[in-house]
Amino acid sequence: MTKDIYKSARGKQVDMGALRLKNEKERAVGNMKVNARGDAVDDKNQSVQSKPQQVHRQYQQQIQAKTTSHKWNLDQ
């Protein structure tokens, strides 16, 4: 159970946490091809790459760029 329970303008209680969990695999609205969790999706709403995989790949690219750009040529 989540603490994200809000009261609507009509006085009904809306559990936003449960709503978020229920719809996390649905395609997000907008021009980015992602679902509500941030996973990359294709045209058929199939998850292509999860958000943790995207973060890990980006982190590895940053680490690789930092290690290759700081090699000093001290033999001169």
Image (spheres, grey):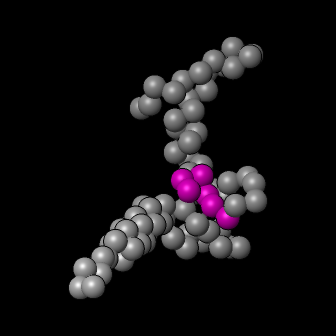
Query: Percent x, y for residue 23?
Result: 59, 49
Q: Is residue 70 above or below residue 32?
A: below
- Quarter of the view holding residue 66: bottom left
Single out the residue that lies furthest toward the front: 76
Figure quadrant of the N terminus? top left
Q: Is residue 60 visible?
A: no
- Residue 57 among those drawn in magenta: no
Single out the residue that lies furthest toward the bottom: 75
Tell whether 62 sits left or right of 36. left
- Quarter of the view holding residue 19: top right
Query: Percent x, y for residue 62?
Result: 42, 67
Q: Residue at left 61%, top 68%?
A: 41
Figure quadrant of the C terminus? bottom left
In the depicted view, which residue is nearer to us: 52 or 61? 61
Q: Residue at left 36%, top 77%?
A: 68
Task: Give the magenta range.
Answer: 33-38
Q: Is residue 76 above or below residue 2?
A: below
Tell whether 74 sits left or right of 53. left
Tell whether 59 sits left or right of 46. left
Question: Predominant secondary structure in magenta?
Answer: loop
Q: Is residue 32 visible?
A: yes
Single out the residue that lies furthest toward the left: 75
In the depicted view, which residue is nearer to us: 69 or 64? 69
Query: Percent x, y for residue 54?
Result: 47, 66
* Count of marks placed on residues: 0
- Quarter of the view holding residue 60: bottom left
Q: Is residue 20 above or below residue 74?
A: above
Q: Residue at left 75%, top 54%?
A: 30
